[in-house]
Image: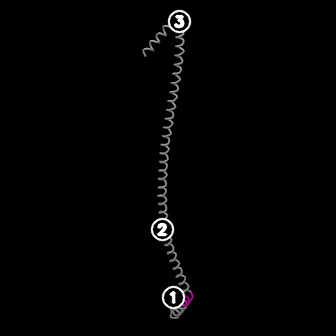
């Protein structure tokens, strides 16, 4: 029952040991422990501040990256539009040149065909003339083999010349 109702001597010694323990802890342990807790609190606070700064920098970098990405997309679109315009222009120029070349070739072909046609017609006329002369020669030789027929033919030609 002494623990439930302690004696005066036990209370005295317990109080004395408790005060001695408080003095020793206060002198040697609490200051370093409190100092370490204060340093720990400071380092945690600094780490939180650094983390917050890093988070803010990451937000800024992300925003900056998004802006750069958007600018790159815009520049890409502009370059693609310019390339399309240049391609369309080159295609149109090629079409025009091809059309001009085709027209020139067609005109050259038409002129060549006309020249060939004229040459063929001239050749045909010459052949017809030769054939006509040969035919006329044979007819005249046959008809004018008789001297009397020659005389009559000459008279007819003279009459025609006088009328003209």
Position of 74 relative to 12 (above/below): above
**Visual colour scheme:** one colour
**Segment colored magenta:** 21-28
Residue 11 located within the stretch drawn in magenta: no
In front of the other: 153 or 53: 153
Q: Earlier in the sequence, mark 2 or mark 3?
A: 2
The image position of residue 95, as x and y in percent, is 48, 43
Quickly name the residue at label 2: 60
Q: For mark 3, what is the residue?
A: 147
Where in the figure is residue 41, as x and y percent of width and height? Answer: 51, 79
Q: Earlier in the sequence, mark 3 or mark 1?
A: 1
Question: Distance from label 3 to label 1 (Cα)?
Answer: 191 Å
Q: Judge by depth and name the residue closer to the eye, 27 or 99.
A: 99
Helix, strand or loop at disc 2? helix
**Secondary element at tag 1:** loop
- Identify residue for label 1: 3
How far apart are the alpha carbons under marks 2 and 1?
Answer: 68 Å
Quarter of the picture containing the C terminus is: top left
Residue at the image position 52 percent from the left and 11 percent from the top: 140
Q: Can you say whether 65 is above or below 131 in the image?
A: below
The disc at residue 108 is none
Query: Which dot, 3 or 1, sits closer to the camera?
Result: 3
Residue at 51% from the left image edge and 74% from the top image edge: 50
């Amino acid at each position: 029952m002494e623990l439930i109702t302690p004696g005066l001597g036990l209370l005295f010694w317990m109080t004395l040991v408790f005060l001695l323990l408080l003095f020793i802890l206060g002198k040697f342990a609490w200051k370093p422990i409190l100092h370490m807790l204060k340093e720990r609190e400071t380092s945690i606070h600094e780490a939180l501040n650094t983390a917050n700064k890093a988070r803010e920098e990451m937000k800024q970098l992300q925003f900056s990256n998004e802006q750069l990405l958007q600018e790159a997309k815009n520049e890409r679109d502009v370059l693609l539009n310019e390339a399309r315009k240049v391609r369309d222009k080159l295609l149109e120029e090629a079409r025009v040149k091809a059309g001009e070349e085709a027209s020139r070739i067609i005109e050259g072909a038409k002129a060549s065909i006309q020249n060939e046609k004229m040459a063929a017609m001239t050749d045909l006329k010459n052949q017809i003339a030769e054939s006509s002369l040969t035919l006329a020669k044979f007819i005249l030789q046959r008809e004018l083999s008789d001297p009397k027929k020659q005389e009559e033919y000459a008279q007819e030609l003279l009459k025609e010349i006088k009328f003209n």
